[in-house]
């Protein structure tokens, strides 16, 4: 029996995951997929369940049971893996975060700045509730968390529950694909050494067939090679900066280190009659996706899903689950307790690093000290993250204010105070802790 519960099963991303499971069925012979969603998402989760059944059948896997649930207990009971990919307040709340940031001349992006802060406040109580159910009903299960802000959410659950949790993001795997592409080398010939926080991670070293290729990749980036995600504009980095940094920043670093350009870009899109904010664009894509998913003749993942930022997310999820299930000891980049891997961060801080993954979970490989500039930003963001967790768990306005102030994309007390008031008002239905 290999049961997987998928919380947020009605997500438009689910067919991506199902495709990953089908492709790796030999390593991961799943017996049941238990899709869970909220009552208001009944229609969507049923569309996903039907599409999932058709996809399984198309691939000769009709023996896999697909069940739909609107409460957690039956779905979690007996599960080996509990995948969390939920969005409290749906895309409308994400759009409101983006618009709120812009109103104050700030970035309100999904996982950085005030957007990441508000999303964390909405999400942490829900995730802790899921973790309590896992402790009670499936204590050996691993929670595989995609829910953003993934680093913060994973740390909150890891520190405040006894459930086993590993956080995941597709940035490392996308980066690996892109760098292998730049070097014109197969995936397996390229090794990347990552260390940082989720959406704040750097590639510190690239090796290709055992030779150091870091400088070569930096030069390719200086020559204008692209390295970004679908959801982030490929604003080129200055060659002087890249050479000075001597590491490869992740796409999300643009929000911190190219703030005026990224903000101008967001403001432009958000203007009346333009494309709209990222969440507003994604809402349109989602409507199209669900129209396709509902077609009874469709039995595969449609191409349109690749427009989303989460491309390859199934690859990381299934690789990780398979490494645990098969006790493989594979080297994967995941979010887990630091345990001394990055010097200068607490052991219980969740970090994004290369880990060896086996049946016991993720074991971070020693990294050591981050260079000063990266360490400075990492420390500041980790302080923001930890204050946000305290605020979310205890409904503490003081910690919330300090958290916002500690975020480099907020900047000053008056703005932090005003943003906090607006976040608490706008999100009232999802913030019972305040
Ligand atoms: C990237 C990030 C994910 C994020 C996604 C947003 O893939 O790693 O954490 O959820 O982008 O994509 P979207 O299409 O929703 O803007
Ligand atoms: Mn991510």
Image (tube, rainbow, N blue to C red):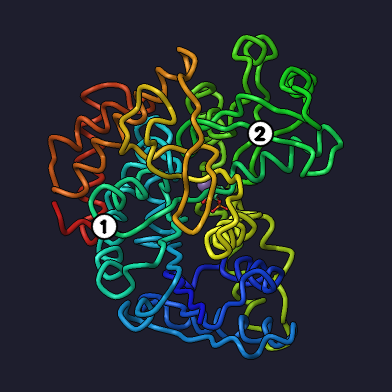
Q: Which label was assigned to residue 367? A: none
Is mark 2 in CB contact (under 8 Å) with mark 1?
Answer: no
Give the mark, 2 or 1, whose residue is nearer the N terminus.
Answer: 1
- Indicate the position of residue 220 as horizontal and vertical percent values: 79, 23
Above-or-below relation of 300 to 244: below
Distance from disc 2 to disc 1, alpha carbons, whole Å, reads: 31 Å
Q: Using the rendered image of the protein, determine whether residue 277 is visible from the camera's viewpoint.
A: no
- Indicate the position of residue 348 as horizontal and vertical percent values: 30, 39
Which residue is depicted at the point 39% across and 83% down? Answer: 69
Tell me which corner region of the image, top left, top right, bottom left or bottom right, holds residue 236: top right
> Callout 2 environment at 10 Å: few (<14), some (14 to 19), or many (20+)?
many
Horizontal arrangement in the rendering, residue 318 relative to residue 120 (left or right): right
Q: Which label was assigned to residue 162? A: 1
Tell me which corner region of the image, top left, top right, bottom left or bottom right, holds residue 214: top right
> Callout 1 environment at 10 Å: few (<14), some (14 to 19), or many (20+)?
some
Q: Secondary structure at mark 1?
A: loop
Above-or-below relation of 293 to 113: below
Quick one: 224 or 135, which is closer to the camera?
135
- Indicate the position of residue 133 as horizontal and vertical percent values: 27, 70
- Indicate the position of residue 301 as horizontal and vertical percent values: 70, 71
Residue beneath disc 2: 192
Which residue is depicted at the point 66% across and 62% down? Answer: 305
Which residue is depicted at the point 74% across and 22% down? Answer: 212
How many tags in the picture? 2
């Amino acid at each position: 029996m290999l049961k997987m519960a998928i919380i947020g099963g009605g997500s438009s991303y689910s067919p991506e995951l199902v495709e990953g499971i089908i492709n790796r069925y030999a390593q991961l012979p799943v017996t049941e997929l238990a899709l869970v969603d909220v009552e208001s998402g009944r229609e969507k989760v049923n569309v996903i369940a039907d599409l999932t059944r058709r996809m399984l059948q198309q691939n000769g896997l009709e023996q896999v049971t697909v069940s739909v649930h609107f409460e957690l207990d039956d779905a979690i009971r007996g599960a080996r893996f509990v995948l969390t990919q939920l969005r409290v307040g749906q895309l409308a709340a994400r759009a409101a975060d983006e618009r709120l940031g812009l109103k104050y001349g700030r970035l309100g992006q999904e996982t950085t700045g005030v957007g990441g802060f508000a999303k964390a406040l909405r999400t942490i109580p829900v995730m802790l509730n899921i973790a309590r159910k896992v402790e009670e009903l499936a204590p050996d299960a691993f929670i595989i968390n995609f829910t953003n802000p993934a680093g913060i959410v994973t740390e909150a659950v890891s520190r405040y529950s006894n459930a086993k949790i590993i956080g995941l993001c597709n940035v490392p795997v996308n980066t690996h694909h892109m760098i292998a592409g730049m070097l014109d080398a197969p995936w397996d010939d390229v090794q990347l050494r990552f260390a940082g926080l989720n959406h704040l991670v750097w590639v510190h070293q690239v090796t290709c067939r055992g030779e150091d290729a870091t400088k070569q990749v930096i030069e390719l980036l200086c020559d204008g090679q692209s390295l970004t995600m679908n959801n982030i504009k490929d604003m080129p980095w200055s060659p002087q900066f890249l050479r000075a940094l001597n590491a490869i920043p992740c796409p999300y670093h643009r929000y911190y280190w190219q703030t005026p350009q990224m903000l101008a870009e967001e403001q432009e899109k958000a203007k009346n009659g333009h494309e709209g904010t990222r969440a507003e664009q994604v809402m349109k894509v989602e409507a199209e996706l669900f129209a396709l998913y509902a077609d009874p003749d469709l039995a595969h993942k449609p191409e349109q899903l690749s427009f989303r930022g989460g491309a390859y997310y199934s690859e990381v999820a299934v690789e990780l689950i398979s490494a645990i299930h098969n006790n493989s000891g594979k080297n994967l980049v995941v979010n887990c307790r630091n345990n001394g891997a990055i010097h200068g961060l607490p052991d219980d801080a969740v970090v994004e690093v290369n880990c060896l993954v086996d049946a016991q979970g993720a074991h971070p490989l020693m990294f050591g000290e981050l260079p000063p500039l990266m360490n400075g930003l990492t420390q500041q963001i980790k302080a923001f993250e930890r204050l946000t967790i305290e605020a979310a768990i205890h409904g503490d306005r003081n910690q919330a204010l300090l958290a916002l102030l500690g975020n480099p994309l907020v900047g000053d007390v008056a703005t932090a105070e005003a943003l906090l008031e607006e976040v608490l008002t706008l999100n009232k239905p999802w913030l019972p802790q305040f």
